[in-house]
Amino acid sequence: MTALAVRHGAVNLGQGFPDTDGPAAMLAAAQEAIASGVNQYPPGPGRPELLAAISESRARYGTAYDPAGEILVTVGATEAIAASLLALVQAGDEVVLFEPYYDSYAASVALAGATRVVVPLVEEESGRFGLSAEALRAAVTPRTKVVLVNTPHNPTGSVFTEAELAAVAEVCVEHDLLAITDEVYEDLVFDGRAHVPLATLPGMAERTLTISSAGKSFNCTGWKIGWVCGPRELVAAVRAAKQFLTFVGGAPFQPAVAHALRTEGPWVAGLRDSLAAKRTRLSAGLAAAGFGVRQAEGTYFVCADIRPLGYDDGVEFCYALPERAGVAAVPLQVFTDSPERWKHLVRFAFCKKDEVLDEAVARLAKLG
Ligand code: PMP
Ligand code: GLN
Protein backbone atom coordinates (compact mmCIF):
# COMPACT_ATOMS: atom_id res chain seq x y z
CA MET A 1 0.00 0.00 0.00
CA THR A 2 2.91 2.33 0.73
CA ALA A 3 4.32 1.62 -2.76
CA LEU A 4 0.88 2.28 -4.31
CA ALA A 5 0.56 5.48 -2.29
CA VAL A 6 3.93 6.71 -3.57
CA ARG A 7 3.02 5.80 -7.18
CA HIS A 8 -0.20 7.84 -7.07
CA GLY A 9 0.98 10.68 -4.83
CA ALA A 10 -1.60 9.53 -2.29
CA VAL A 11 -1.83 10.60 1.34
CA ASN A 12 -0.56 7.47 3.08
CA LEU A 13 -2.82 6.55 5.98
CA GLY A 14 -1.97 2.90 5.36
CA GLN A 15 1.26 1.97 7.12
CA GLY A 16 1.35 3.14 10.72
CA PHE A 17 4.33 5.39 11.33
CA PRO A 18 4.45 8.94 12.68
CA ASP A 19 5.49 11.89 10.51
CA THR A 20 7.18 13.82 13.33
CA ASP A 21 10.26 13.01 15.43
CA GLY A 22 10.52 11.89 19.02
CA PRO A 23 11.77 13.97 21.98
CA ALA A 24 14.78 16.15 21.10
CA ALA A 25 16.80 15.05 24.15
CA MET A 26 16.36 11.39 23.12
CA LEU A 27 17.59 12.14 19.58
CA ALA A 28 20.56 14.04 21.07
CA ALA A 29 21.31 11.12 23.40
CA ALA A 30 21.64 8.76 20.40
CA GLN A 31 23.95 11.21 18.63
CA GLU A 32 25.97 11.61 21.80
CA ALA A 33 26.23 7.82 22.18
CA ILE A 34 27.58 7.51 18.63
CA ALA A 35 30.02 10.39 19.17
CA SER A 36 31.26 8.88 22.40
CA GLY A 37 31.96 5.45 20.91
CA VAL A 38 28.91 3.31 21.72
CA ASN A 39 29.23 1.64 18.34
CA GLN A 40 30.24 -1.98 18.95
CA TYR A 41 28.19 -5.03 20.00
CA PRO A 42 26.25 -4.36 23.19
CA PRO A 43 26.00 -7.17 25.80
CA GLY A 44 23.75 -10.10 24.75
CA PRO A 45 20.81 -9.22 27.05
CA GLY A 46 21.08 -5.48 26.24
CA ARG A 47 22.93 -2.50 27.74
CA PRO A 48 22.62 -2.38 31.55
CA GLU A 49 21.18 1.17 31.67
CA LEU A 50 18.39 0.14 29.30
CA LEU A 51 17.62 -3.07 31.23
CA ALA A 52 17.37 -0.98 34.42
CA ALA A 53 15.16 1.63 32.73
CA ILE A 54 12.81 -1.08 31.36
CA SER A 55 12.54 -2.62 34.82
CA GLU A 56 11.67 0.82 36.31
CA SER A 57 9.17 1.46 33.52
CA ARG A 58 7.32 -1.83 34.17
CA ALA A 59 7.17 -0.99 37.89
CA ARG A 60 4.36 1.50 37.11
CA TYR A 61 2.10 -1.53 36.62
CA GLY A 62 3.25 -3.10 39.88
CA THR A 63 5.36 -5.78 38.19
CA ALA A 64 8.99 -6.36 39.22
CA TYR A 65 11.46 -7.70 36.65
CA ASP A 66 15.09 -8.28 37.57
CA PRO A 67 17.29 -6.48 35.00
CA ALA A 68 19.69 -9.41 35.40
CA GLY A 69 17.86 -12.27 33.68
CA GLU A 70 14.19 -11.30 33.48
CA ILE A 71 14.51 -8.73 30.66
CA LEU A 72 15.97 -9.09 27.17
CA VAL A 73 16.47 -6.27 24.67
CA THR A 74 15.49 -7.20 21.11
CA VAL A 75 15.44 -5.72 17.61
CA GLY A 76 11.98 -4.23 18.00
CA ALA A 77 8.93 -6.04 19.27
CA THR A 78 8.93 -7.95 15.99
CA GLU A 79 12.05 -9.88 16.93
CA ALA A 80 10.79 -10.35 20.49
CA ILE A 81 7.61 -11.97 19.14
CA ALA A 82 9.50 -14.20 16.70
CA ALA A 83 12.15 -15.24 19.25
CA SER A 84 9.51 -15.90 21.92
CA LEU A 85 7.53 -18.18 19.61
CA LEU A 86 10.69 -19.95 18.40
CA ALA A 87 11.61 -20.47 22.05
CA LEU A 88 8.27 -21.71 23.34
CA VAL A 89 6.60 -23.76 20.61
CA GLN A 90 7.39 -26.51 18.13
CA ALA A 91 5.68 -28.67 15.54
CA GLY A 92 2.41 -30.04 16.90
CA ASP A 93 1.84 -27.14 19.29
CA GLU A 94 -1.03 -24.73 18.79
CA VAL A 95 -0.86 -20.98 19.31
CA VAL A 96 -4.09 -19.05 19.73
CA LEU A 97 -4.27 -15.67 17.98
CA PHE A 98 -7.19 -13.27 18.08
CA GLU A 99 -8.16 -11.94 14.67
CA PRO A 100 -7.71 -9.52 13.14
CA TYR A 101 -4.06 -10.07 14.14
CA TYR A 102 -0.83 -8.18 13.48
CA ASP A 103 0.70 -9.82 10.43
CA SER A 104 3.98 -10.97 11.99
CA TYR A 105 2.20 -13.35 14.40
CA ALA A 106 1.06 -15.83 11.77
CA ALA A 107 4.46 -15.75 10.06
CA SER A 108 6.34 -16.28 13.34
CA VAL A 109 4.07 -19.17 14.38
CA ALA A 110 4.81 -20.73 10.97
CA LEU A 111 8.57 -20.15 11.33
CA ALA A 112 8.39 -21.99 14.65
CA GLY A 113 6.67 -24.89 12.87
CA ALA A 114 3.57 -24.61 15.08
CA THR A 115 -0.08 -24.23 14.10
CA ARG A 116 -2.17 -21.12 14.61
CA VAL A 117 -5.72 -21.31 15.88
CA VAL A 118 -7.61 -18.11 15.25
CA VAL A 119 -10.34 -16.70 17.46
CA PRO A 120 -12.25 -13.68 16.12
CA LEU A 121 -12.72 -10.51 18.14
CA VAL A 122 -16.35 -9.58 18.53
CA GLU A 123 -17.67 -6.53 16.68
CA GLU A 124 -19.93 -4.95 19.30
CA GLU A 125 -22.99 -2.72 18.74
CA SER A 126 -21.07 0.22 20.16
CA GLY A 127 -18.51 0.01 17.35
CA ARG A 128 -15.91 -1.49 19.65
CA PHE A 129 -14.14 -4.81 19.11
CA GLY A 130 -14.21 -7.01 22.22
CA LEU A 131 -12.31 -10.05 23.44
CA SER A 132 -14.37 -13.18 24.10
CA ALA A 133 -12.87 -15.55 26.65
CA GLU A 134 -15.68 -17.99 25.84
CA ALA A 135 -14.53 -18.16 22.23
CA LEU A 136 -10.97 -18.63 23.51
CA ARG A 137 -12.06 -21.44 25.80
CA ALA A 138 -13.78 -23.18 22.90
CA ALA A 139 -10.59 -22.97 20.83
CA VAL A 140 -8.32 -24.58 23.43
CA THR A 141 -7.27 -28.18 22.70
CA PRO A 142 -4.78 -30.50 24.40
CA ARG A 143 -2.19 -29.19 21.93
CA THR A 144 -2.66 -25.50 22.84
CA LYS A 145 0.58 -24.11 24.26
CA VAL A 146 0.46 -20.33 23.92
CA VAL A 147 -2.13 -17.56 23.75
CA LEU A 148 -0.92 -14.36 22.09
CA VAL A 149 -2.71 -11.19 23.17
CA ASN A 150 -2.21 -7.71 21.70
CA THR A 151 -3.51 -4.76 23.71
CA PRO A 152 -3.90 -1.93 22.79
CA HIS A 153 -4.88 -3.68 19.59
CA ASN A 154 -3.70 -3.16 16.04
CA PRO A 155 -5.68 -2.93 13.72
CA THR A 156 -8.94 -2.34 15.64
CA GLY A 157 -7.77 0.31 18.13
CA SER A 158 -9.39 -1.59 21.03
CA VAL A 159 -7.94 -1.35 24.54
CA PHE A 160 -8.99 -4.53 26.31
CA THR A 161 -10.52 -4.06 29.73
CA GLU A 162 -9.36 -5.65 32.96
CA ALA A 163 -12.49 -7.82 32.91
CA GLU A 164 -11.81 -9.07 29.37
CA LEU A 165 -8.18 -9.82 30.22
CA ALA A 166 -9.05 -11.44 33.57
CA ALA A 167 -11.31 -13.86 31.69
CA VAL A 168 -8.43 -14.68 29.31
CA ALA A 169 -6.12 -15.15 32.31
CA GLU A 170 -8.59 -17.58 33.84
CA VAL A 171 -8.51 -19.75 30.71
CA CYS A 172 -4.69 -19.65 30.68
CA VAL A 173 -4.47 -20.73 34.30
CA GLU A 174 -7.18 -23.37 33.95
CA HIS A 175 -5.45 -25.02 30.96
CA ASP A 176 -1.88 -24.27 32.06
CA LEU A 177 -1.13 -22.18 28.96
CA LEU A 178 1.70 -19.72 28.39
CA ALA A 179 0.87 -16.19 27.28
CA ILE A 180 2.77 -13.79 25.04
CA THR A 181 1.58 -10.20 25.08
CA ASP A 182 2.29 -7.49 22.53
CA GLU A 183 1.97 -4.14 24.33
CA VAL A 184 3.75 -1.84 21.87
CA TYR A 185 0.90 0.70 22.08
CA GLU A 186 0.81 0.60 25.90
CA ASP A 187 1.28 4.37 26.21
CA LEU A 188 -1.26 5.25 23.53
CA VAL A 189 -4.60 4.76 25.31
CA PHE A 190 -7.20 7.52 25.19
CA ASP A 191 -10.04 9.09 27.14
CA GLY A 192 -8.72 8.15 30.58
CA ARG A 193 -8.54 4.42 29.86
CA ALA A 194 -5.83 2.35 31.52
CA HIS A 195 -3.54 -0.16 29.85
CA VAL A 196 -3.67 -3.47 31.74
CA PRO A 197 -0.74 -5.86 31.22
CA LEU A 198 -1.95 -9.47 31.25
CA ALA A 199 1.03 -10.36 33.48
CA THR A 200 -0.48 -8.29 36.33
CA LEU A 201 -3.51 -10.59 36.64
CA PRO A 202 -3.64 -13.47 39.14
CA GLY A 203 -1.60 -16.50 38.13
CA MET A 204 -0.16 -14.82 35.03
CA ALA A 205 3.26 -13.37 35.99
CA GLU A 206 4.82 -16.83 36.02
CA ARG A 207 3.43 -17.81 32.60
CA THR A 208 3.62 -14.57 30.59
CA LEU A 209 6.23 -13.05 28.31
CA THR A 210 5.46 -9.33 28.06
CA ILE A 211 6.70 -7.57 24.94
CA SER A 212 6.93 -3.88 24.14
CA SER A 213 9.17 -1.46 22.26
CA ALA A 214 10.24 2.17 22.03
CA GLY A 215 8.96 2.88 18.51
CA LYS A 216 5.39 3.89 19.30
CA SER A 217 5.94 5.60 22.67
CA PHE A 218 8.76 7.83 21.43
CA ASN A 219 8.05 8.25 17.68
CA CYS A 220 11.12 6.26 16.67
CA THR A 221 9.71 3.27 14.77
CA GLY A 222 12.92 3.01 12.73
CA TRP A 223 15.17 2.50 15.75
CA LYS A 224 13.82 -0.99 16.40
CA ILE A 225 14.57 -1.22 20.11
CA GLY A 226 12.19 -3.68 21.77
CA TRP A 227 12.16 -5.89 24.83
CA VAL A 228 10.67 -8.93 26.44
CA CYS A 229 10.11 -9.32 30.19
CA GLY A 230 9.13 -12.50 32.02
CA PRO A 231 10.17 -15.38 34.24
CA ARG A 232 13.90 -16.09 34.15
CA GLU A 233 13.66 -19.55 32.47
CA LEU A 234 11.36 -18.29 29.73
CA VAL A 235 13.49 -15.22 29.04
CA ALA A 236 16.60 -17.44 28.90
CA ALA A 237 14.88 -19.57 26.25
CA VAL A 238 13.98 -16.46 24.23
CA ARG A 239 17.58 -15.28 24.50
CA ALA A 240 18.81 -18.63 23.16
CA ALA A 241 16.64 -18.12 20.05
CA LYS A 242 17.54 -14.44 19.72
CA GLN A 243 21.25 -15.25 19.89
CA PHE A 244 21.08 -16.79 16.42
CA LEU A 245 18.57 -14.40 14.89
CA THR A 246 20.44 -11.14 15.46
CA PHE A 247 22.56 -11.73 18.62
CA VAL A 248 22.25 -8.02 19.55
CA GLY A 249 21.17 -4.75 17.96
CA GLY A 250 21.07 -0.96 17.98
CA ALA A 251 23.89 -0.22 20.46
CA PRO A 252 23.74 3.62 20.38
CA PHE A 253 19.95 3.68 20.46
CA GLN A 254 19.85 1.69 23.69
CA PRO A 255 21.17 4.46 26.01
CA ALA A 256 18.91 6.95 24.19
CA VAL A 257 15.83 4.79 24.83
CA ALA A 258 16.94 4.31 28.45
CA HIS A 259 17.02 8.10 28.77
CA ALA A 260 13.59 8.40 27.17
CA LEU A 261 12.02 5.76 29.44
CA ARG A 262 13.41 7.54 32.49
CA THR A 263 12.74 11.17 31.66
CA GLU A 264 10.25 11.60 28.82
CA GLY A 265 7.02 10.73 30.63
CA PRO A 266 5.60 14.25 30.09
CA TRP A 267 6.49 14.11 26.39
CA VAL A 268 4.69 10.76 26.08
CA ALA A 269 1.63 12.21 27.85
CA GLY A 270 1.63 15.02 25.27
CA LEU A 271 1.89 12.48 22.45
CA ARG A 272 -1.05 10.54 23.87
CA ASP A 273 -3.22 13.67 24.07
CA SER A 274 -2.24 14.74 20.60
CA LEU A 275 -3.04 11.28 19.17
CA ALA A 276 -6.40 11.22 20.96
CA ALA A 277 -7.24 14.53 19.28
CA LYS A 278 -6.07 13.21 15.90
CA ARG A 279 -8.24 10.12 16.41
CA THR A 280 -11.23 12.40 16.97
CA ARG A 281 -10.33 14.61 14.00
CA LEU A 282 -9.93 11.74 11.53
CA SER A 283 -12.95 9.84 12.87
CA ALA A 284 -15.16 12.92 12.40
CA GLY A 285 -13.80 13.46 8.89
CA LEU A 286 -14.37 9.84 7.90
CA ALA A 287 -17.91 9.94 9.29
CA ALA A 288 -18.64 13.14 7.34
CA ALA A 289 -17.29 11.41 4.20
CA GLY A 290 -19.86 8.65 4.74
CA PHE A 291 -17.84 5.85 6.35
CA GLY A 292 -19.21 3.85 9.27
CA VAL A 293 -16.53 4.77 11.79
CA ARG A 294 -15.67 2.35 14.61
CA GLN A 295 -14.33 3.27 18.06
CA ALA A 296 -10.58 3.76 18.47
CA GLU A 297 -9.74 3.55 22.17
CA GLY A 298 -5.98 3.66 21.64
CA THR A 299 -3.13 2.98 19.13
CA TYR A 300 -2.55 4.78 15.81
CA PHE A 301 -5.55 3.31 14.04
CA VAL A 302 -9.26 3.72 13.39
CA CYS A 303 -11.35 1.21 11.44
CA ALA A 304 -14.14 2.22 9.11
CA ASP A 305 -16.99 0.36 7.41
CA ILE A 306 -17.07 0.94 3.65
CA ARG A 307 -20.60 -0.43 3.09
CA PRO A 308 -22.39 2.91 3.67
CA LEU A 309 -20.38 4.22 0.70
CA GLY A 310 -21.61 1.39 -1.51
CA TYR A 311 -18.50 -0.82 -1.40
CA ASP A 312 -18.25 -4.28 0.11
CA ASP A 313 -14.71 -5.57 -0.34
CA GLY A 314 -11.88 -3.87 1.54
CA VAL A 315 -9.11 -5.32 -0.64
CA GLU A 316 -10.70 -4.03 -3.87
CA PHE A 317 -11.51 -0.74 -2.17
CA CYS A 318 -7.96 -0.20 -0.85
CA TYR A 319 -6.28 -1.19 -4.12
CA ALA A 320 -8.41 1.35 -5.99
CA LEU A 321 -8.33 4.12 -3.37
CA PRO A 322 -4.88 5.67 -4.08
CA GLU A 323 -5.77 6.27 -7.73
CA ARG A 324 -9.45 7.03 -7.19
CA ALA A 325 -9.16 9.33 -4.19
CA GLY A 326 -5.44 9.94 -3.57
CA VAL A 327 -5.49 8.24 -0.16
CA ALA A 328 -4.06 4.91 1.05
CA ALA A 329 -5.65 2.66 3.70
CA VAL A 330 -5.27 -1.01 4.65
CA PRO A 331 -8.05 -3.63 4.41
CA LEU A 332 -8.69 -5.68 7.56
CA GLN A 333 -8.74 -8.83 5.42
CA VAL A 334 -4.92 -8.84 5.44
CA PHE A 335 -4.95 -9.34 9.22
CA THR A 336 -7.22 -12.37 9.25
CA ASP A 337 -7.86 -16.00 8.28
CA SER A 338 -11.55 -15.34 7.59
CA PRO A 339 -11.72 -12.50 5.04
CA GLU A 340 -15.51 -12.76 4.65
CA ARG A 341 -16.04 -11.73 8.25
CA TRP A 342 -13.83 -8.62 7.99
CA LYS A 343 -14.10 -7.49 4.39
CA HIS A 344 -16.36 -4.50 5.14
CA LEU A 345 -13.65 -2.83 7.23
CA VAL A 346 -10.54 -0.82 6.37
CA ARG A 347 -7.91 0.69 8.65
CA PHE A 348 -6.73 4.31 8.60
CA ALA A 349 -3.66 5.53 10.55
CA PHE A 350 -4.02 8.87 12.32
CA CYS A 351 -0.40 9.26 13.57
CA LYS A 352 0.05 12.10 11.06
CA LYS A 353 0.16 15.91 11.10
CA ASP A 354 -3.28 17.55 11.29
CA GLU A 355 -2.88 19.07 7.82
CA VAL A 356 -2.16 15.61 6.40
CA LEU A 357 -5.31 14.20 8.05
CA ASP A 358 -7.34 17.17 6.78
CA GLU A 359 -6.06 16.70 3.24
CA ALA A 360 -6.94 12.99 3.37
CA VAL A 361 -10.44 13.80 4.62
CA ALA A 362 -10.95 16.47 1.93
CA ARG A 363 -9.99 13.92 -0.73
CA LEU A 364 -12.18 11.18 0.77
CA ALA A 365 -15.15 13.55 0.98
CA LYS A 366 -15.29 13.47 -2.86
CA LEU A 367 -15.68 9.68 -2.89
CA GLY A 368 -19.35 9.42 -2.01
N1 PMP B 1 3.13 -5.32 17.17
C1 PMP B 1 2.21 -4.47 16.71
C2 PMP B 1 0.79 -4.69 17.10
C3 PMP B 1 2.57 -3.40 15.89
O1 PMP B 1 1.66 -2.57 15.40
C4 PMP B 1 3.94 -3.22 15.57
C5 PMP B 1 4.38 -2.05 14.76
N2 PMP B 1 4.22 -2.18 13.42
C6 PMP B 1 4.85 -4.15 16.05
C7 PMP B 1 4.42 -5.18 16.85
C8 PMP B 1 6.30 -4.09 15.70
O2 PMP B 1 7.01 -3.31 16.59
P1 PMP B 1 8.55 -3.00 16.37
O3 PMP B 1 8.61 -1.93 15.31
O4 PMP B 1 9.02 -2.56 17.68
O5 PMP B 1 9.20 -4.26 15.88
N1 GLN C 1 2.83 -1.33 12.68
C1 GLN C 1 2.71 -0.68 11.47
C2 GLN C 1 1.39 -1.00 10.82
O1 GLN C 1 0.66 -1.88 11.26
C3 GLN C 1 3.84 -0.84 10.47
C4 GLN C 1 4.67 -2.05 10.52
C5 GLN C 1 4.93 -2.65 9.15
O2 GLN C 1 4.73 -2.01 8.14
N2 GLN C 1 5.31 -3.89 9.15
O3 GLN C 1 1.06 -0.34 9.88
Image: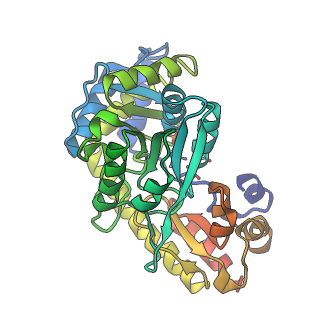
Q: Between residues 339 and 134, which one lies in front from this camera angle?
A: 134
Q: How many marks?
A: 0
The image quarter in which residue 233 lies: top left
49 w.r.t. 143: above or below: above
Indicate the quadrant containing the N terminus: top left, top right, bottom left or bottom right.
bottom right
**Residue 271 shown left or right of residue 85 in the figure:** left
Q: Is residue 64 shown to the viewer in this render?
A: yes
Q: Measuring from the top left, give residue 274's x and y in whole percent.
A: 39, 63
Q: Position of residue 312 (x, y in %)?
A: 72, 77
323 horizontally vs 73: left or right:
right
Task: Please identify the residue farthest to the left as the structure is shown.
Answer: 62
199 sits to left or right of 91? left
Residue in the picture at 63% in, 67% down: 342
Q: Position of residue 255 (x, y in %)?
A: 37, 26
Residue located 58% across and 65% down the image: 348
Residue 105: quarter of image: top right
Query: Would you place residue 89 above or below residue 35 in this image?
Result: below
Residue 46 shows in the view: no
Q: Nearer the viewer, residue 114 or 39?
A: 114
Instruction: Please identify the quadrant where the C terminus is shown.
Output: bottom right
In x, y percent, where is residue 11?
A: 66, 64
Decide which of 161, 48 is in the foreground and name it. Answer: 161
Q: How is the image coloured?
A: rainbow
- Position of 209 relative to 366 (above/below): above
